[in-house]
Amino acid sequence: MRAIQQQAWGGPEELRWVSVERPVPLPTEVLVRVVAAGVNPVDVFTREGRAYMRALSLPHIPGWDVSGIVEAVGYGVTRFQVGDAVFGMPWFPRQAGAYAEYVTAPARHFALKPASLSHVEAAALPLAGLTAWEMLQEIAHVGRGQRVLINAGAGGVGHLAVQIAKSLGAWVIATARSEKHAFMRELGADEVHDYTQADPAEVFKNIDVVIELVGGETCLRLLRTLRPGGLLISAQAAWAPQLFTEAERLNVRASGYLVEPNGHGLDELARLIEAGRLKPHIHQTFPLSQAREAQALIAGGRTVGKIVLTGES
């Protein structure tokens, strides 16, 4: 099969379009023909060999977001059958190999693709959607009337988090540049703030939950928006080592976070999709062979929604 492979840590030039052996599903696994694969910032961190992602071995086939068709099932699989359209985020943070024509993974790392979504839209959903769902529902237990601040609200995770938080009944505040405010309001944000004009930490107070997606000094400043005992969950806590001591000093709570494969969470995302309460936004698509260009675009940090790679056939 054809795939994008990386043989050394570094820049986009390390991504090579190669031929490799097609994987074979083990018991409890499925073989999925990849129709589309999502691109995420963590793909760039991985390529560069940053932080915990350096634990992956080389050569490495990048990517975790998959939407495709079940081509074969291993012994013991009861969740799917050949021909099912599925989507998922297998194996994270170990190699899943989504930038390829085929992947294998445990059946319970996937869910049935919502019929209302194209494969491109479904490939945009798993990693970012599970990140938003697990942070809001499984860690923060966000409920009706709570004030939730989502920074980087127009990004891949952020634009899904806005919609999920609204589905949970929260009052949602999103940060984004002014040119993205109309998009944020279309998604359901109750308030939108341009972080380039004023520091959100100086504008907002008594927030119940902060969904923090940037890290560094931004992460530390947003602790000041919380009410006493409020909770900040950071998907970028690795870049803010002082987070927990600063939270204790301010009498608020902080949690680091890393997304996990979650078949139940995928089912919940599918339920929201079918109910018309969640929809991924596609910024741009690229053929799989142009993964370098796709990663270069997402590394720029100015995309709205998700970037997706599509199959070559």
Image (cartoon, grey):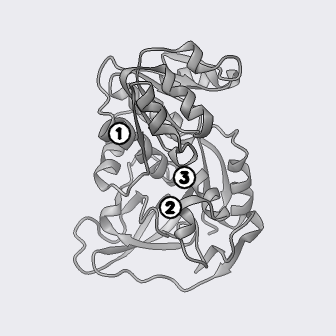
Q: Relative to 252, is 27 on the left or the right? A: left
**Dot label at residue 64:** 2
Q: Amino acid at mark 3?
A: Val
Instruction: Using the rendered image of the protein, determine whether residue 152 is visible from the camera's viewpoint.
Output: no
Q: Nearer the viewer, residue 227 or 105?
A: 227
- Which label lies toward us, 1 or 2? 2
Q: Which label's residue is closer to the chain start, 1 or 2? A: 2
Q: Relative to 65, is 20 on the left or the right? A: right
Mark 3 and mark 1 in contact? Answer it, CB < 8 Å: no
Q: Amino acid at mark 1?
A: Glu
Q: Which residue is mark 3?
A: 120
Q: Measuring 60% from the left and 58% from the top, which residue is drawn there?
A: 43
Instruction: Using the rendered image of the protein, determine whether residue 310 is visible from the camera's viewpoint.
Output: yes
Q: Measuring 31% from the left and 56% from the top, which residue is drawn there?
A: 263
- Helix, strand or loop at mark 3: helix
Quarter location, residue 108: bottom left
Quarter location, residue 77: bottom left
Badge 2: few (under 14), some or many (20 or more) residues near its Cα, within 10 Å?
many
Q: Which residue is mark 1?
A: 274
Vertical placement of residue 94 versus 188, above or below:
below
